[in-house]
Amino acid sequence: MLNFALPAGRATRTVRWSSSAAVRRRGAVRQHRRGLAIGIDIGGTKVAAGVVDAEGRVLEEQRRATPGRDPRAVERVIVELVQDLGERHRIASLGIGAAGWMDLDGGTVLFSPHLAWRNEPLRDKLQEMLRRPVLVVNDADAAAWAEWRFGAGRGESRLVCITLGTGIGGAMVMDGRLERGRFGVAGEFGHQVAVPGGHRCECGNRGCWEQYASGNALGREARELARRNSPLAHELLKASGGVVDDITGLTVSQLAKAGDPASKELLEEVGQWLGLGLANLAAALDPGTFVIGGGLCDAGELLAGPARQAFARNLTGRGFRPPAAIKLAELGPKAGMIGAADLSRVSGRRHG
Ligand SMILES: [Zn+2]
């Protein structure tokens, strides 16, 4: 075992890792792949870290609030979480999933929408602080990898994953490896234009798919309905205490599950936009399976049913080709953490 301390000037705590000498020993690579890994998922509001075994099981999990937008503060939280978990587990590798574009090499976060990372050399900084190899990946890539290894995408050779949250995240696992594009930024499916001149998107364009098939879209449509004083919006207004601006996609999703007809209709509409976009992706990529994850997939078949119908109606060559399966994700919000951990474990073999 190797003891190490943080760089001078910081509070010094020793952490026990598998020794680097052991990793160099004959046969140690296999041990590395079977060993425990830490996966860290950095989101806009929280940093979640878990100890994950080789079967994708989370043995222990810790969460902290994301400390504002200061990159240094985020790095400190990561180091603290790794030290804390490392005290109780023998850790062989470490992977970090973050919302943002990574360069193909995985060392630099080119851009992060929620964090103040612009050309941030995150991997090198963390490796310096932790004194061991760190893998940094896009969070949607990490989640897709987890679903392919342990979830709804198991056994699929051409997998496309869609994460529906406030926007749409996308990632692909093709022939057992992440497909990241020429520059590392593939999978931005949410910003394909679905409606020219449509709703304004954060990216600057108008009519992006994620403006129609996401949690944000669901909330916006529900608020619109409520503002019109439609009697249909009665339950939505009741659930938000009469405050229109407090109606979110989650409000709609929960009411739909409870049977509110208007909420079911709103969710159905979002599901139809989802299915249309999936048909477009099938025309380009021809996957065998789409896995739909993210917060919005809690709505289950209320979302997936209309999506499958719209997919079948819009699929090019329908009737003359096998349709892709559309499945709901199985790993829930831990997918990013599990995938980042697993990628760090197998990175020498499959990733990059
Ligand atoms: Zn956009």
Image (spheres, helix red, strand yellow):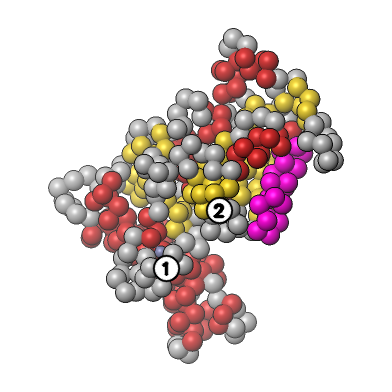
In magenta segment, residue 79: yes
Q: Residue furthest bottom?
A: 229
State the SS at label 2.
strand
Above or below: residue 164 compared with residue 15: below
Foreground residue among 308 and 191 = 191
**Residue at image point 39% right, 49% down:** 187
In the rendered view, does 111 fall on the left or right side of 160? Answer: right
**Residue at image point 60% right, 22% down:** 32
- Ranked by sequence position, the earlier of labels 1 and 2 is 2
Q: Position of residue 55 (x, y in %)?
A: 56, 31
Residue at which label 2 appears: 118
Query: Residue 204's mark?
Result: 1
In magenta segment, residue 37: no
Q: Give the quadrant of the C terminus.
A: top left
What segment is highlighted magenta in the picture?
Answer: 66-85
Q: Ligand 1 closer than 8 Å to the CB at disc 2?
A: no
Q: Give the quadrant of the N terminus.
A: top right
